[in-house]
Amino acid sequence: MAMDLAKQKIWHKAYEHALETITSLRNHCDFKYQKDTKGADTVYILNAFVPTAKKYTPGSDIEREAIDATRKELHLDQMYYFNIEEDDVDAVQSVEGALEAAATEGARALSEQGDIYVAGLIKAGVSDKSIATITAGAVSKTNAVEKVEDAFAILYGNNVKPSSTFYLEVKPKFFTAFRQNLTELFTNNVEMAKKGYVGKYGNALVSIENLLPDDGTNDINVLRTGKAIAFAEQLKETKHYEPEGSFSKAIKSLYVYGAKVLNPEQIVGIPTTK
């Protein structure tokens, strides 16, 4: 009994972090409009007018067309934050670093909201049919490639060049059926793994995406180019501060962003039974 009383209880000197969600949906978007967002809550994106090619008959008058450019609006209206504090007494009496560890988790949670928002845009596009889909059905090892090729056929039919870089974003169930058909596995490719890619199929970089949407019956896997969805991060700010009226330290962070399906002809949904 005396020996038991002499035994210490030791705190481990580090904090275990939660597993990161497997997702990279926002990273596969077009960020080129981000530089235009400083000091603005909306970016107007103009589409160039396409003149009509008309047959010319010598000796006859030619017709003129007025340029009628169309625009799309990218709104930076998504705002999320976290605000955490640690009492000074708690900080002294426990293993240090709790506030910083929690802030790291908070930063991940904020970034994840961007992926969730992109998934929501995809779901809305599939629902209102502005985003095309192939025929829904169960996925298996024997039909997984056929489903992907059907999606490619739609994009090619929309004049998306075969030389484009494509992103094939799939749920785990689809990936396990499709994996043996990858033309290149990135199992030992550290750099590609860091970017979230598990392999390649033709010109498509393949990633597992746990935040992809579903319609209640089907998972919505996706094949798209990087120009299909525009994404812009206007503000990513983190501040350390000491709250008034307390003995504590705190960290707060704000994340402001926006996204839009800019080129729906460059994205296809691949619905498969959940």
Image (cartoon, rainbow, N blue to C red):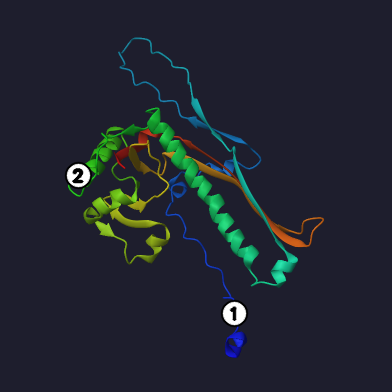
The x and y percentages for residue 160 are: 32, 38
- Identified by mark 1, the residue type is Lys
Q: Is residue 214 visible?
A: yes
Mark 2 crowdedness (10 Å alpha carbons): few <14, some 14-19, many ≥20? some
Q: Is residue 31 visible?
A: no
Q: Nearer the viewer, residue 99 or 69?
A: 99
Residue 180 location, quadrant: bottom left
Residue indicated by mark 2:
143
Residue at 32% x, 61% y is: 186
Residue 75 location, quadrant: top right
The x and y percentages for residue 183 are: 24, 55
Q: Give the numbered dot on residue 9.
A: 1
Q: Earlier in the sequence, mark 2 or mark 1?
A: 1
Residue 2 location, quadrant: bottom right
Mark 1 crowdedness (10 Å alpha carbons): few <14, some 14-19, many ≥20? few
Q: Give the numbered dot on residue 116.
A: none
Q: Secondary structure at mark 1?
A: loop
The x and y percentages for residue 18 are: 50, 61
- Labels 2, 1: front one: 1
Q: Nearer the viewer, residue 250 or 149?
A: 250
Please tell me whether residue 226 is drawn above or below residue 73 in the rendered image: below
